[in-house]
Image (cartoon, rainbow, N blue to C red):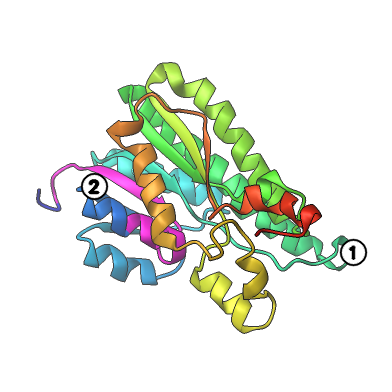
Amino acid sequence: MSKNESQELCLITGGASGIGEACARELFSRGYEIAIADKNPKGEKIASELSGKFFPLDVSESTEIDALAEAISNSGNFIHTLINCAGIIQQPLPPEELSLKTWDDIVRIDQRGTYYCSVAFAREMIKRGRGNIVNIASITAMRSVPLHAYAPAKAAVVSMTECLAAEWGRHGVRVNAVSPGHTLTPALQSAISAGERDIKLLEENALGRMVNPEEVAKAVAFLVGDESSAITGVNLPVDCGWLVAGSWHTYGGLR
């Protein structure tokens, strides 16, 4: 297909690095036409490597999201699959040390950005009667952790996934979430290198290791593929067993 012909695209927000980049590469390997939307210009290089499209986008700005959705629709292209990966992480600070600006930034990008991208691109999906959305949430959405902005924002992502799945299911649009565990992305590696996170603690799970971004991407690919055609509204943890391991500390830890 030439660049001038209309295309059915898989759009990955935050596709310039980490889990988003891994999703772009995995889905490309499975035959998807890739589009990356990111404020990081590195996304353009990755999109080029995948014979795809790149769109500069700040998901915290609803006007930018609306403009991109309209431009893609007007071009004759169709976003049939949306992967909401754009997000930022947080240091595990006490609430009294967590600035309101940081809290607002995380909620605006991780929660509001995910919601608004879903709404903006689902409009065309609804018109056509088909589409797939996968939201990247987090295992922190399901446990008490000292991430007083990030964890509640990701819990909201899980909740909105369930709400939108019910809302749009009769329109042929499936909405699911993947909740990664501690995944060795560039952002987390930077925190480890800065001494902000302890890798030994991050590996306290059933499998005794961290998650690779490629493993999250394979779960995402499953949820947008035909193999999961009857699945909507689920939250799939990809966490090396972190969720099942925590309660064992009461009994002396994992054996």
Q: Mark 2 points at which residue?
A: 32
Query: How far from the left and from the top, in percent, is residue 223?
Result: 39, 38
Q: Which of 243 and 140 is in front in this view?
A: 243
Q: Report whether 207 appears left or right of 248.
A: left
Q: Residue placed at 56% from the left, 64% from the top?
A: 208
Q: Name the residue under label 1.
A: 96
Query: How far from the left and from the top, in percent, is residue 152?
Result: 72, 47
How far apart marks 1 and 2 lie (CA) works out to: 45 Å
Query: How far from the left and from the top, in percent, is residue 126?
Result: 39, 24
**Residue 89 is one of the magenta-drawn residues:** no
Amino acid type indicated by mark 2: Tyr
Q: Residue placed at 64% from the left, 49% from the top?
A: 243
Amino acid type indicated by mark 1: Glu
Which stretch did the figure color magenta? 4-24
Q: How crowded is mark 2: few (under 14 residues within 10 Å), some or many (20 or more)?
A: some
Q: Which residue lies furthest to the right in this view?
A: 96
Q: Can residue 47 be seen in this view?
A: yes
